[in-house]
Image (spheres, rainbow, N blue to C red):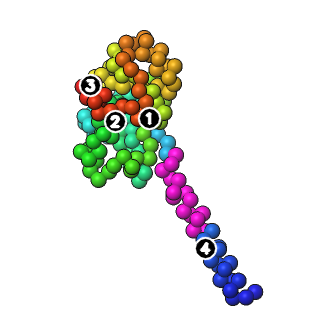
Amino acid sequence: MSTKKHIRIHIVSCLAIFFLLLTPALSWGADVGPRKPSKQDKCPVCGMFVSKYPDWVAEVIFKDGKAVFFDGAKDLFKYYFNLKKYDPGRNPGDVAVIYVNEYYDMELIKAEEAFFVVGSDVYGPMGRELIPFSSKADAETFMADHKGKAILKFKDVTRETIEKLD
């Protein structure tokens, strides 16, 4: 076999190994599952111990693997809208995934897929709260039963929405 052919085979082999090693690193943050807060995890917004309120847990997981826990969706949004205050050096592009606790199933769901009821008569650990649901039908039922004012998707929640809850 010629030297040129050996070199080509070596280069192709090295590139194949490189891409095999690179692929998991690129997708590492793409499908990060929810985590459970420890007894020491505090909400960075209000300072409450999050594990005391398992029915209200929300979390942000960053692409570098860091997880931040909250005692409700309202504080999660306060944090997300003001990352410079609560986590200097980070920005929304650093976020891998955000989870909120679904009200009926008590399971963490991706916040971007949730339907949030605003203005209901159900209060969380920090008072008036956004109540997350995995389906619009569940959100509509809850809204009718608990005097909710609106159903919003993650992208539709604004700073003003959160300010009105305080």
Foreground: disc 2 or disc 3: 3
Residue at 33% x, 40% y: name it. 80
Structural distance between the alpha carbons of marks 2 and 1: 10 Å
Instruction: Report the disc number at residue 76.
Output: 2
Three-letter residue code for mark 2: Leu
Which residue: 26% across, 44% down?
A: 86
Place residue 13 in its image quadrant: bottom right
To which residue does mark 4 refer? 14
Residue density around tag 1, few if under 14, some if 14–19, many if 20 or more, within 10 Å: many
x then y, percent, for residue 119:
33, 19
Query: Is residue 30 one of those drawn in magenta?
Result: yes
Q: Are marks 3 and 4 in contact (CB under 8 Å)?
A: no
Name the N-terminal-most of marks 3 and 4: 4
The disc, 4 or 2, on the residue closer to the chain's N-terminal end is 4
Q: What distance separates the C-alpha of mark 1 from that of mark 3? A: 20 Å
Indicate the secondary structure of the residue bearing disc 3: helix
Q: Label the magenta part by its dominant secondary structure.
A: helix
Counting other residues with Cα less than 10 Å from the Cα at mark 4, is it few (<14), some (14-19), or many (20 or more)? few
User: Which residue in the structure is indicated by mark 1?
Assistant: 111
